[in-house]
Image: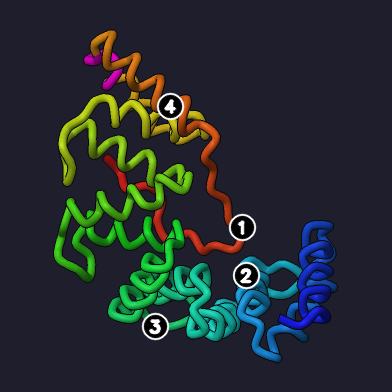
């Protein structure tokens, strides 16, 4: 990336963070038009959220797709979500799974989570709790709170993974500290059944993981955490 591109991206992010969305739009537009995938993804976000422009899902999807084909993981996850939810386009489950899989393969937390939800529910793919748990874990380990909640629930009930109260305690506690209500409710049930040794092990694991976080303000929310 050329220095002027870096400067333009830095200025655009600074403008965005200061609420100067129109300025950010102009800067990202110039970078997007010369093929900068990150700028294309940010433009998609502006149109998806109506930051400095009118909400336009079709235009948002168009910019996200330009970034997605260049391998930008966040954009791939958003394209998958939009095709699944018929947002800016007709619903296309095959394309949704294609792009969510690409995003998941690239480690994007929302791509991992949304694809896991599809395997959990059996929507567009065969229901597969083991595959869902694997995907939730990859996102959970990056600090994705809804994935932590779901993985904890699966460990508590032995769904797709071995029933393990210590692991359930770890992931549910991590999710609960960030306000995931379903995690807190499930955690209370798990703690009632834990031995003193299990609680000690769970607390030690929690101490190791508590500072792990995951944030991304460009993502399209496809699903909340699946209902237990």
Label 1: which residue? 217
Question: In the image as oriented, which residue stretches furthest toward the top?
Answer: 196
Q: Which of label 4 and label 1 is nearer to you?
A: 4
Where disc 4 sits, the SS reads helix
In front of the other: label 2 or label 3? 2
Instruction: Give the Cα distance between marks 4 and 1.
Output: 26 Å
Q: Is residue 187 left or right of residue 14?
A: left
| Residue occupied by mark 2 | 45
Inter-mark Cα distance, 2 to 1: 9 Å
* First-in-chain label (4 vs 2): 2
Check if mark 4's residue and mark 3's residue have beta carbons within 8 Å.
no
Q: Nearer the viewer, mark 4 or mark 3?
A: 4
* Residue 57, x across and y down, in percent: 56, 77
Please name the residue that numbered disc 3 is placed on: 90
The crowd level at tag 1 (other Cα within 10 Å; few <14, some 14-19, many 20+) is few
Q: Residue at x 40, y 51 (%)?
A: 139
Q: Position of residue 211 (x, y in %)?
A: 55, 35
Q: What residue is shown with label 4?
A: 206
Q: Which residue is at the far bottom?
A: 34
Q: Is residue 105 left or right of residue 6?
A: left
Kindly check if marks 2 and 1 are in contact, taking CB atoms under 8 A apart as contact. yes
Give the main secondary structure, helix, strand or loop, of the magenta stretch.
Answer: helix
Magenta range: 190-194
Sequence-first disc among 2 and 3: 2
Q: State the separation of the CA atoms marked 4 and 3.
A: 43 Å
Identify the secondary structure beneath mark 3: loop
Callout 4: few (<14), some (14-19), or many (20+) C-alpha neighbours within 10 Å?
some
Mark 2 lies on a secondary structure that is helix
Q: Is residue 26 among what the camera can see?
A: no
Mark closer to the observer (1, 3): 1
């Amino acid at each position: 990336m050329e220095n002027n591109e870096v400067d333009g991206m830095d200025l655009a992010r600074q403008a965005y963070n200061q609420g100067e969305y129109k300025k950010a739009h102009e800067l990202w537009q110039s970078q997007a038009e010369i093929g900068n995938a990150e700028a294309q993804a940010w433009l998609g976000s502006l149109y998806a959220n109506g930051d400095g422009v009118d909400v336009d899902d079709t235009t948002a999807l168009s910019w996200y797709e330009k970034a997605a084909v260049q391998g930008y993981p966040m954009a791939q996850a958003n394209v998958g979500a939009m095709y699944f939810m018929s947002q800016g386009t007709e619903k296309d489950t095959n394309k949704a799974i294609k792009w969510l899989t690409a995003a998941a393969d690239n480690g994007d937390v929302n791509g991992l989570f949304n694809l896991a939800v599809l395997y959990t529910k059996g929507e567009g793919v065969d229901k597969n709790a083991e595959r869902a748990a694997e995907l939730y874990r990859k996102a959970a380990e990056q600090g994705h709170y809804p994935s932590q909640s779901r993985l904890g629930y699966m460990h508590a009930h032995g769904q797709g993974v071995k029933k393990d109260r210590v692991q359930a305690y770890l992931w549910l506690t991590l999710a609960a500290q960030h306000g995931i209500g379903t995690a807190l409710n499930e955690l209370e049930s798990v703690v009632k059944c834990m031995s003193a040794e299990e609680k000690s092990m769970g607390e030690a694991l929690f101490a190791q993981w508590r500072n792990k976080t995951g944030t991304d303000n460009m993502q399209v929310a496809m699903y909340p955490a699946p209902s237990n």
